[in-house]
Image (cartoon, rainbow, N blue to C red):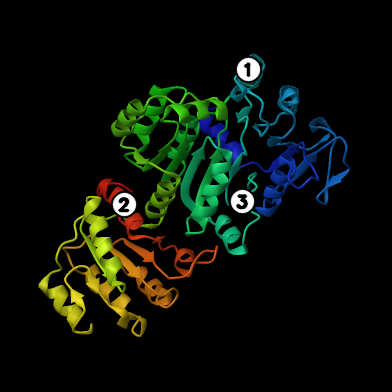
Amino acid sequence: MSRTELLKQIFGARSVAVVGASRRSGHPGHLALMGLMESGFDGEIYPINPSAKEIAGTKAYPDVKSVHEPIDLAFIAVPAAKVVSILRECAEKGVKGAIINSAGFKELGTPEGIEREEEVRRVASNTGMGVIGPNCVGFHRSSISTMPGLSQPAEIRMILKEKGNVGMTSQSGWFCGFYIHKCALRGVRFSTVISSGNEADFTTTDFLEYLGEDEETKVITLYLEGVRDGANFLRASKAITPKKPIIIWKVGLTKAGSRAALSHTGSLAGHKGVYGAVFRQAHIVPAFSSKELIDFTVAFSLCRKPKGNRVGIISSPGGFAVATADACERFGLDVPRLSEKTSNELKKFLPRYSSTLNPVDLTMTAIENPQFYPKCMRILDSDNKIDSIIVVTGASGIYDEFIIESFNEIEKPVLVVLTPYWTLKAEPTALAKAGIPTYTYPEEAAKSLAALARLGPSRP
């Protein structure tokens, strides 16, 4: 069986044993159990704890062998010294895959930790059971999740339970949860999110190849500390990027960051220049911060692809109209003067003092005339000198229904910059729930659109 086929079986598990399940709310075994239950997983869940009869209303078992039904997946959250014996027990039971949450392996940098991880690798190799981790939080899909990130506002939980087009793999378990939350807040839906940990068995490249073949996944993103086999990683990436974009936030590029990566997951971070060359060869989109990775994810997941780099800007706030134009040109986009025909169409309903060149400045009159936005969007959509549109709004909520109404009619990609005076609530906006890419600052929208435009018209 190929590695990808084995991962398909693991991600499609219909029965999960949580070894080390606990009633303690902060314990990893409790968090995984709650993740499964709150994700709406409708398969069988078997808490494993020799000291409990029942956990969270579910019958508990003393060990894996005591479960008489088949088990597809085991989530292991016990002290590191006990992990290998439990892995062997799972293999004897016929478990297809295991997630090792436990830390205390190669990342310690000690002979004992390194040998313990080698033993995990040997068990996986000798038995054919797939192992994710150690030192990870597992994975999240719309129908099954071992990640503890679902104890969130109801509207975010709802988005996380919807199928999406973004597949992500991360060598940081914490960042998985952070990334999921921040992306869902902006309307991104996921196919599969994977916490890879130390990668004793399955590697980033294995997950990359799985996401490359997965039909639901249209955009692939990574948090990457290092790779074990650079040539294999490059081969896999080059095979995928003609069909799907890969966006990577590579960390550990400084001396301090490299040391931190080694102690975090035991990854050898590698030289900045080497990774830069690999990214260029494979046409990988680099992100240089967590914020940038999230911003790019929003654009690539929710935005239609532009045919070129020419941008039309529609704005009510005059200052941000100028700032958006500056940002677009700074990141390599073109802000051309609108055609005479387009300008004349806009003048038919906009105030005399509105600019109809580009940016289109709606002024404060848009507050009383929110229909200006969809009218302008439709007109710019028909201008063959424009490839994409950035919409900048002022007052929050006033324009939402008008933008949502016209968004699906517009053929060109549209990004929206929301700029209310007050802080938005920590829940998805109406635009985000409708799947419209939104940003807080013009620079974020412009940089994300520029990255998307650089892929070229043949890309997804």
Q: Label 3 vs label 1: CA separation?
A: 38 Å
Front residue of this view, candidates 66 and 167: 167
Task: Say which label, 3 or 1, has the lower sequence index.
Answer: 1
Mark 2 closeness class: few <14, some 14–19, many ≥20 residues within 10 Å: many
Q: Position of residue 232 (x, y in %)?
A: 41, 24
Between 450 and 319, the residue placed more toward the observer is 319
Q: Residue 123 location in percent, x, y? A: 66, 20
Distance, label 2 to label 1, CA atoms, is 43 Å
Which residue lies under the disc numbered 1?
A: 110
Quadrant of the image occupied by residue 162: bottom right
Residue highlighted by disc 2: 447
Residue 13, how many percent across, how many down? Answer: 64, 41
Asked if residue 137 is positioned above or below residue 281 in the image, the reply reads: below
Q: Quadrant of residue 363?
A: bottom left
User: As shown in the figure, which amino acid type bears the numbered disc 1?
Assistant: Thr
Tell me the amino acid under the disc marked 3: Ser
What residue do we see at 39% from left, 76% from top? 399
Q: Quadrant of residue 46?
A: top right
SS assignment at label 3: loop
Mark 1 neighbour density, 10 Å: few (under 14) some (14–19) many (20 or more): few
